[in-house]
Image (cartoon, helix red, strand yellow):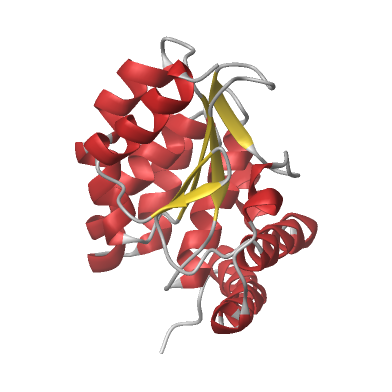
Amino acid sequence: MSRPAASDRRFARMSRRAAVTGAALALMSLSACGGDKVSKAAEGDMVLGAPEGAKVTVIEYASVTCSHCAAWQATVWPEFKAKYVDTNKVRYVFREFPTAPVELATAGFLVARCAGPDKYFQVVDELMARQNEMFTTVPRTVLLDIAAKAGVDEARFTTCLSDQAAVARMDARVKAGIDAGVDGTPAFFVNGEKMTDASLAALSGKIDAALAAN
Protein backbone atom coordinates (compact mmCIF):
# COMPACT_ATOMS: atom_id res chain seq x y z
CA MET A 1 0.00 0.00 0.00
CA SER A 2 1.40 3.40 -0.93
CA ARG A 3 2.02 5.92 1.81
CA PRO A 4 -0.24 9.02 1.78
CA ALA A 5 1.34 12.23 0.54
CA ALA A 6 2.48 14.73 3.18
CA SER A 7 -0.32 17.11 2.26
CA ASP A 8 -2.89 14.32 2.71
CA ARG A 9 -1.45 13.47 6.14
CA ARG A 10 -1.78 17.12 7.15
CA PHE A 11 -5.37 17.07 5.92
CA ALA A 12 -6.02 13.99 8.07
CA ARG A 13 -4.52 15.66 11.15
CA MET A 14 -6.73 18.69 10.60
CA SER A 15 -9.70 16.36 10.25
CA ARG A 16 -9.01 14.68 13.57
CA ARG A 17 -8.68 18.07 15.26
CA ALA A 18 -11.92 19.24 13.67
CA ALA A 19 -13.73 16.27 15.19
CA VAL A 20 -13.70 18.20 18.47
CA THR A 21 -16.47 20.28 16.92
CA GLY A 22 -18.50 17.12 16.56
CA ALA A 23 -18.28 16.54 20.30
CA ALA A 24 -19.77 19.97 20.83
CA LEU A 25 -22.75 19.02 18.69
CA ALA A 26 -23.65 16.32 21.20
CA LEU A 27 -24.47 19.07 23.67
CA MET A 28 -27.33 20.38 21.53
CA SER A 29 -30.01 18.37 23.30
CA LEU A 30 -29.02 20.02 26.58
CA SER A 31 -29.18 23.57 25.25
CA ALA A 32 -31.83 26.18 25.83
CA CYS A 33 -32.84 28.72 23.23
CA GLY A 34 -31.52 32.25 23.80
CA GLY A 35 -32.51 34.78 21.16
CA ASP A 36 -30.69 37.61 22.95
CA LYS A 37 -27.45 35.67 22.57
CA VAL A 38 -28.10 35.12 18.88
CA SER A 39 -28.74 38.73 17.95
CA LYS A 40 -25.51 40.14 19.38
CA ALA A 41 -22.53 40.53 17.05
CA ALA A 42 -20.10 37.65 17.46
CA GLU A 43 -16.52 36.83 16.56
CA GLY A 44 -16.30 35.43 13.06
CA ASP A 45 -19.61 36.81 11.76
CA MET A 46 -19.65 37.15 7.97
CA VAL A 47 -22.01 39.94 6.94
CA LEU A 48 -23.75 41.23 3.83
CA GLY A 49 -26.30 43.95 3.27
CA ALA A 50 -27.26 46.70 5.70
CA PRO A 51 -24.76 48.00 8.29
CA GLU A 52 -24.79 47.24 11.99
CA GLY A 53 -27.77 48.80 13.69
CA ALA A 54 -30.13 47.95 10.82
CA LYS A 55 -33.82 47.65 11.61
CA VAL A 56 -33.78 43.97 10.67
CA THR A 57 -30.99 41.45 11.14
CA VAL A 58 -31.31 37.94 9.73
CA ILE A 59 -28.85 35.38 11.02
CA GLU A 60 -28.32 32.03 9.32
CA TYR A 61 -26.44 29.14 10.88
CA ALA A 62 -25.43 26.72 8.14
CA SER A 63 -23.00 24.01 7.11
CA VAL A 64 -21.49 23.40 3.70
CA THR A 65 -22.12 19.65 4.20
CA CYS A 66 -25.82 20.10 5.04
CA SER A 67 -28.09 19.07 2.17
CA HIS A 68 -30.95 21.27 3.42
CA CYS A 69 -28.56 24.23 3.53
CA ALA A 70 -27.48 23.56 -0.04
CA ALA A 71 -31.11 23.32 -1.13
CA TRP A 72 -31.96 26.64 0.55
CA GLN A 73 -28.90 28.22 -1.01
CA ALA A 74 -29.96 27.08 -4.47
CA THR A 75 -33.68 27.77 -4.31
CA VAL A 76 -34.27 30.60 -1.81
CA TRP A 77 -31.05 32.54 -1.38
CA PRO A 78 -30.95 34.19 -4.85
CA GLU A 79 -34.38 35.79 -4.42
CA PHE A 80 -33.84 36.54 -0.74
CA LYS A 81 -30.53 38.23 -1.56
CA ALA A 82 -32.02 40.29 -4.37
CA LYS A 83 -35.02 41.35 -2.28
CA TYR A 84 -33.37 42.15 1.04
CA VAL A 85 -29.58 42.00 0.97
CA ASP A 86 -28.69 43.75 -2.27
CA THR A 87 -31.18 46.51 -1.40
CA ASN A 88 -29.68 46.94 2.09
CA LYS A 89 -33.06 46.39 3.71
CA VAL A 90 -31.63 43.65 5.91
CA ARG A 91 -28.35 42.94 7.63
CA TYR A 92 -27.62 39.32 6.78
CA VAL A 93 -25.22 37.46 9.08
CA PHE A 94 -23.83 34.04 8.18
CA ARG A 95 -22.50 31.85 10.97
CA GLU A 96 -20.63 28.59 10.43
CA PHE A 97 -22.04 25.51 12.09
CA PRO A 98 -20.25 22.43 10.71
CA THR A 99 -22.33 19.26 10.48
CA ALA A 100 -21.44 15.70 9.50
CA PRO A 101 -19.01 14.96 8.08
CA VAL A 102 -17.71 17.64 10.44
CA GLU A 103 -14.09 17.41 9.26
CA LEU A 104 -15.13 18.15 5.67
CA ALA A 105 -17.40 21.03 6.64
CA THR A 106 -14.66 22.50 8.79
CA ALA A 107 -12.14 22.21 5.97
CA GLY A 108 -14.55 23.94 3.59
CA PHE A 109 -15.07 26.85 5.95
CA LEU A 110 -11.32 27.16 6.53
CA VAL A 111 -10.83 27.44 2.77
CA ALA A 112 -13.55 30.11 2.57
CA ARG A 113 -11.88 32.16 5.31
CA CYS A 114 -8.49 31.65 3.71
CA ALA A 115 -9.85 33.18 0.49
CA GLY A 116 -10.54 36.41 2.36
CA PRO A 117 -13.69 38.41 3.21
CA ASP A 118 -14.22 39.58 -0.37
CA LYS A 119 -14.37 36.00 -1.67
CA TYR A 120 -15.78 34.23 1.38
CA PHE A 121 -19.36 34.02 0.14
CA GLN A 122 -18.21 33.06 -3.34
CA VAL A 123 -16.42 30.05 -1.87
CA VAL A 124 -19.36 29.10 0.36
CA ASP A 125 -21.69 29.28 -2.65
CA GLU A 126 -19.47 26.92 -4.63
CA LEU A 127 -19.02 24.54 -1.71
CA MET A 128 -22.80 24.29 -1.43
CA ALA A 129 -23.22 23.82 -5.18
CA ARG A 130 -20.57 21.08 -5.29
CA GLN A 131 -21.62 19.35 -2.11
CA ASN A 132 -22.58 16.09 -3.82
CA GLU A 133 -19.26 16.08 -5.68
CA MET A 134 -17.39 16.39 -2.38
CA PHE A 135 -19.35 13.42 -1.03
CA THR A 136 -18.83 11.15 -4.03
CA THR A 137 -15.24 11.90 -5.11
CA VAL A 138 -11.99 12.80 -3.36
CA PRO A 139 -13.02 15.81 -1.23
CA ARG A 140 -9.53 17.27 -1.03
CA THR A 141 -9.38 17.51 -4.82
CA VAL A 142 -12.67 19.41 -4.91
CA LEU A 143 -11.57 21.73 -2.11
CA LEU A 144 -8.28 22.41 -3.88
CA ASP A 145 -10.11 23.29 -7.08
CA ILE A 146 -12.48 25.66 -5.27
CA ALA A 147 -9.54 27.23 -3.43
CA ALA A 148 -7.62 27.75 -6.67
CA LYS A 149 -10.59 29.52 -8.26
CA ALA A 150 -10.59 31.90 -5.29
CA GLY A 151 -6.87 32.61 -5.69
CA VAL A 152 -5.60 30.27 -2.96
CA ASP A 153 -2.66 28.13 -4.08
CA GLU A 154 -1.90 24.67 -2.68
CA ALA A 155 0.74 25.88 -0.24
CA ARG A 156 -1.65 28.42 1.24
CA PHE A 157 -4.44 25.84 1.20
CA THR A 158 -2.34 23.42 3.27
CA THR A 159 -1.38 26.16 5.71
CA CYS A 160 -5.02 27.14 6.20
CA LEU A 161 -6.16 23.59 6.87
CA SER A 162 -3.36 23.21 9.43
CA ASP A 163 -4.34 26.38 11.32
CA GLN A 164 -5.24 24.99 14.74
CA ALA A 165 -6.11 28.44 16.08
CA ALA A 166 -8.67 28.87 13.30
CA VAL A 167 -10.19 25.47 14.09
CA ALA A 168 -10.37 26.38 17.78
CA ARG A 169 -12.17 29.61 16.92
CA MET A 170 -14.66 27.62 14.88
CA ASP A 171 -15.21 25.24 17.78
CA ALA A 172 -15.98 28.27 19.96
CA ARG A 173 -18.47 29.59 17.40
CA VAL A 174 -20.23 26.22 17.27
CA LYS A 175 -20.50 26.11 21.04
CA ALA A 176 -21.90 29.64 21.06
CA GLY A 177 -24.51 28.59 18.50
CA ILE A 178 -25.49 25.59 20.61
CA ASP A 179 -25.79 27.82 23.65
CA ALA A 180 -28.09 30.10 21.64
CA GLY A 181 -30.42 27.22 20.83
CA VAL A 182 -29.25 26.09 17.39
CA ASP A 183 -30.25 22.44 17.05
CA GLY A 184 -29.96 21.89 13.32
CA THR A 185 -29.10 23.56 10.04
CA PRO A 186 -30.05 25.73 8.38
CA ALA A 187 -31.29 27.74 11.35
CA PHE A 188 -32.64 31.26 10.86
CA PHE A 189 -33.24 34.04 13.36
CA VAL A 190 -34.99 37.30 12.49
CA ASN A 191 -34.14 39.98 15.06
CA GLY A 192 -33.28 37.20 17.50
CA GLU A 193 -36.47 35.18 16.96
CA LYS A 194 -35.94 31.66 15.71
CA MET A 195 -37.86 30.76 12.57
CA THR A 196 -39.40 27.32 12.20
CA ASP A 197 -40.10 27.91 8.50
CA ALA A 198 -37.22 28.99 6.28
CA SER A 199 -39.29 29.48 3.13
CA LEU A 200 -39.09 32.85 1.41
CA ALA A 201 -42.75 33.47 2.21
CA ALA A 202 -42.26 32.87 5.94
CA LEU A 203 -39.06 34.91 6.13
CA SER A 204 -40.62 37.72 4.12
CA GLY A 205 -43.66 37.85 6.37
CA LYS A 206 -41.53 38.29 9.47
CA ILE A 207 -39.06 40.68 7.82
CA ASP A 208 -41.66 42.89 6.16
CA ALA A 209 -43.59 43.22 9.41
CA ALA A 210 -40.43 44.27 11.22
CA LEU A 211 -39.52 46.76 8.50
CA ALA A 212 -42.99 48.28 8.64
CA ALA A 213 -43.05 48.60 12.44
CA ASN A 214 -42.36 51.96 14.05
Please identify the quadrant where the C terminus is shown: top right
Write down the quadrant of residue 15 in the picture: bottom right
**Residue 40 horizontal/vertical position (percent):** 72, 42
Q: Nearer the viewer, residue 51 or 104?
A: 51
Q: Nearer the viewer, residue 197 or 163?
A: 197
For the point 39% across and 55% down, the residue is 186
* Most distant residue in the left direction: 75
Q: In this orientation, does residue 126 appear?
A: yes
Above or below for 58 versus 159: above
**Residue 104 horizontal/vertical position (percent):** 46, 65
For the point 53% across and 24% down, the residue is 48
Please identify the quadrant where the N terminus is shown: bottom left
Does residue 49 appear left or right of residue 130 in this picture? Answer: right
Could you tell me how many numbered marks the image carries? Answer: 0
**Residue 46 horizontal/vertical position (percent):** 60, 35
**Residue 30 horizontal/vertical position (percent):** 61, 83
Above or below for 63 versus 127: below
* Most distant residue in the bottom direction: 1
For the point 73% across and 44% down, the residue is 42
Does residue 193 appear left or right of residue 203 in this picture? Answer: right
Q: Nearer the viewer, residue 63 or 57?
A: 57
Write down the quadrant of residue 180 in the picture: bottom right
For the point 62% across and 60% down, the residue is 177
Above or below for 35 versus 47: below
Does residue 14 appear left or right of residue 147 in this picture? Answer: right
* Most distant residue in the right direction: 165
Q: In this orientation, does residue 130 appear?
A: no
Above or below for 136 versus 130: below
